[in-house]
Amino acid sequence: MLSVRVLGSSSAMPLHGRHHSAQWLQYENLYFLLDCGEATQHQLLRYRLPFPKLNAIFITHLHADHVGGLAGLLTTLHMQGRQKPLYLFGPVGLRAFLEGQLLGTFSALRYPLYIQEMLLRREKVLLWEDNRIEAWGFPLQHGVPTNGYLFVEKPKPRRLDPARFAESGLPNKLLPLLKQQGEIVHEGRRITWDSVSLPPPPPRSYAYCTDTTFTTEIADFVSGVTVLYHEATFLSEHQDRAKQTFHSTAREAALIAEASHAQRLYIGHFSTRYKDLLPLLEEARQYFAETYLVEEGQTLAFP
């Protein structure tokens, strides 16, 4: 089951209870970290998340509120005795940034660290694939090289319907053969696997879009997404500031959700000027009703 835990919800400056950007994504025994702002380690410990088992980290961009905790986390994994490889995905410049951080602090890692930098291309790129999930990267517009990420479950196999199978009259011992071949002729009747099974639930997906100015290109990259997380740093009354800083308003996040046919929208990366976040939610819901505010420690709900 796809699960996302919110570790940080603030923008460039943290507030008490609103940390820098980070989210924890889990699918079965696969663990991903999305961004790693300052104090991410504290949040991982606070919520008792199994970060020594991390498989990969996905960094959106190199602003400090998204990478301020990265070098510290990597060295903690080293001190914990990690041996297995860790995969790190991010924008151009990530390798140089980390080399500077590690060399400058006289740090070395005993485990293999594989870094893949996404080139500056206006297309969606497959970064991770196994028999459970795919992870895609795509460009955002933030004034510096920035990536969004899309995580998509692999389709599940069809499930046996015991009632339909009983009606078919096929002996139990022939069930494995039916599943393998897809159909069997038994006592003159053709029986198919589809006729005695149920379709799997639709694969779910999650898109992580921060930081970015408003661009409808995002809707194309995440079309049909189940749950969309999109930054909503400002209210529309601060539209000029949003444009100057390459950020989005709550209204713009909602428009992307609508255009992408998302089932649910979560907004975050809130400017510290807003102590009351309800106006951001109200603004977004005028354009996309299934909008929710992220809260730290929250596990996002998938429809």
Image (cartoon, helix red, strand yellow):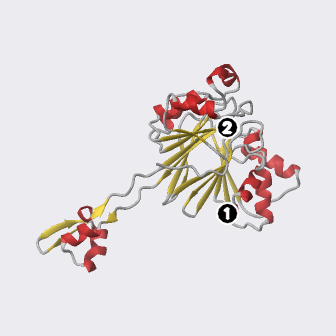
Q: Residue 195: image x %, image y %? A: 23, 62
Circle on res. 34:
none
Residue linked to disc 2: 269
Q: Residue 62: image x %, image y %? A: 73, 40
* Chain-order first, disc 2 or disc 1: 1
- Distance between the alpha carbons at the discs numbered 2 and 1: 24 Å
Residue sticking out furthest to the left: 188
Q: Residue 295: image x %, image y %? A: 64, 45
Q: Quadrant of residue 144?
A: top right
Do callouts 2 and 1 mark residues in contact (Cβ within 8 Å)? no
Residue 217 in view of the camera: no
- Give the camera-side residue of 190 and 233: 233
In the image, taking residue 234 as reference, residue 185 lies left or right, namely left
Q: Residue 290: image x %, image y %? A: 49, 38
Dot 1 amino acid type: Pro
Q: Is residue 190 above or below residue 68?
A: below
Residue 79 in view of the camera: yes
Residue linked to disc 1: 50
Dot 2 amino acid type: His
